Amino acid sequence: MVNCSNLVSYVQVTATSPFIRYSSKYAGQSRKEYTASKDATKTFGVPDLPRSTPDTFLKKGAKFKPVRLRNADEDYSSVKAKIDPWLYIQPHPLSRDFIRKTRNELKEMEPKFPMPACVDRHNGDRYQLNKSGLVPYFVFKPAYGKCPRYLVKQHKKAASLKRTSDLHKARDEYLLTSDKQFVMIKEDERQAVLEKLRHNFDEAIHQFQALSFALDNQTKIKTKTNLERDLNELEKTIDLVSRRNNIVVKMD
């Protein structure tokens, strides 16, 4: 009896993805050649690096160090990497111990307490309780019920001015009664003197502003010094005449 099942050759068809439209017949061969050209990992473990001989010094290829391939049956568990031992360097001691300083600061630090707050309703605004008026905040102040400092200074300044004015007035009265050479100038005369002083001050300040910016000789320096002295004297005299209403002068 003859078996006729193998008379027709069977062609195996591989199932392809419906998304691939074209597949090259050289794809499998190219993939094999690509993987065959890759070198295996030759640096697994500690490499054996032989030393170069003196006869290859400064020759071409002398720096090339071949790596010996290791056998799979060899035991490399006891092999250690040939590296230089790590040298521990003692750091320089600091002049200040910051850790101890921070620890002492934390010990001396006062604990923080939450700020007392007040809320007007369930979903209302939150604000400080001391400034809300619900606690007697201002009553416990050390200066509560005392006169403010600025008012004390103003009272002392007014009392000092009054004392000085009384002393000047008493001295003027004494000079007028004791000697007839001293007379008190009138109000219109005082205003005229004040206007004359202000006019002289304006002229001096105009001359001072007209000076050159560069003081390159002694004449300019001396002129500026004299004008500054005159301006200071005129300013003091104007202030004195404008503040005092009663002025006593000596008749020549």
Image: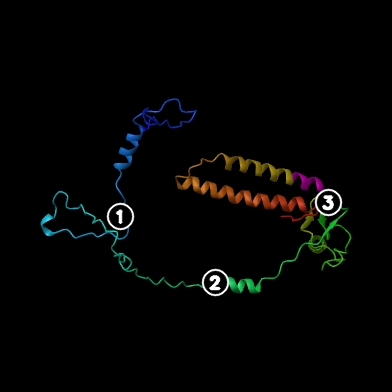
Q: Which element type, helix, strand or loop, lies under badge 2?
A: helix
Query: In screen coordinates, is 109 left or right of 142?
Result: left
The answer to whether residue 59 is above or below residue 20 is below
Amino acid, disc 2? Ile
Q: Which element type, helix, strand or loop, lies under badge 1?
A: loop
Q: Residue 125 bears which disc, if any?
A: 3
Query: In screen coordinates, is 118 left or right of 64?
Result: right
**Front: mark 1 or 2:** 1
Residue sitting nearer the eye, 139 or 167: 139
The answer to whether residue 73 is above or below residue 15 is below
Magenta-colored segment: predominant secondary structure: helix
Q: Which element type, helix, strand or loop, lies under badge 3?
A: loop
Closer to the chain start, of discs 1 and 3, is: 1
Q: Which residue is labeled 1 in the image?
A: 43
Residue sitting nearer the eye, 5 or 18: 5
Q: Are marks 1 and 2 in contact (CB under 8 Å)?
A: no
Query: In screen coordinates, is 74 left or right of 63?
Result: right
Q: Which residue is labeled 2 in the image?
A: 99
Amino acid, disc 1? Thr
